[in-house]
Amino acid sequence: MEQRFKILRYILYGIELLVLFVLQGTPNLVPELYGGRPNLLLPAVLTIAMFEPKLPALFFGAAGGLLTDIGGGEVIGFFAIIATVLCYFTSYLTSDIIRTSLLTAMLITLIAVPVTLGLHFLFFYVFKGYGEIVYFFVNHYLSRILYTIAAMPIIYFINRNLAIRIASIE
């Protein structure tokens, strides 16, 4: 019986990732603020990792990262690798060391999102030798980082309610 609800929860998480992928990739659906659009999949996989064991968190991180890579139209694998490692580490932290809460989710996001998007900027803009580094970061990446962090509470409460409601059925 418990296995059936676990599969249901994983299917719902998968549907959530697909819906966020479509929302994130649809032009003019999510408004662009100061040159940046949010990466909705990164907070989603981080919050999924907060409520799931390490191995499923790892797979959801890889799936969300691959969807981000596919949607970005760049090198496939960058976000997949980063999100996989982040989700495994997040699941480890929230299952063994710290309690899961909105504050924990925000702290993890405040660290993970700037590091992830900062590395993306470094590898795909700075190392390619483009000019106007500060201007491009401030006008495109900084707003994207802040917008992604701002989306975290909404996604956290969606995943928290999903995890709690399905656990209460079990």
Image (cartoon, helix red, strand yellow):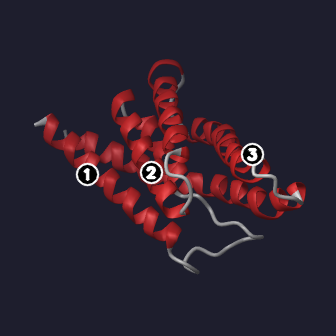
Q: In this view, does 14 lie to the left or right of 91?
A: left
Q: Quadrant of the C terminus?
A: top left
Q: How crowded is mark 1: few (under 14 residues within 10 Å), some or many (20 or more)?
A: few
Q: Name the residue under label 1.
A: 11
Question: Could you tell me the amino acid type at mark 3?
Answer: Leu
Q: Name the residue under label 2.
A: 66
Place residue 138 in its image quadrant. bottom right
- Please name the residue shown 44% across and 56% down the image: 67
Q: Is residue 19 left or right of residue 125?
A: left
Q: Name the residue under label 3.
A: 122
Question: Could you tell me the amino acid type at mark 1?
Answer: Ile
Do residues under tags 2 and 3 come within 8 Å of each other at their CB atoms? no
Q: In this view, does 2 lie above or below 145?
A: above
Spot occupied by residue 76 in the image (x, y as percentages of width and height): 49, 51
Distance Cα–Cα, label 3 vs label 1: 35 Å
Spot occupied by residue 8 in the image (x, y as percentages of width and height): 21, 48
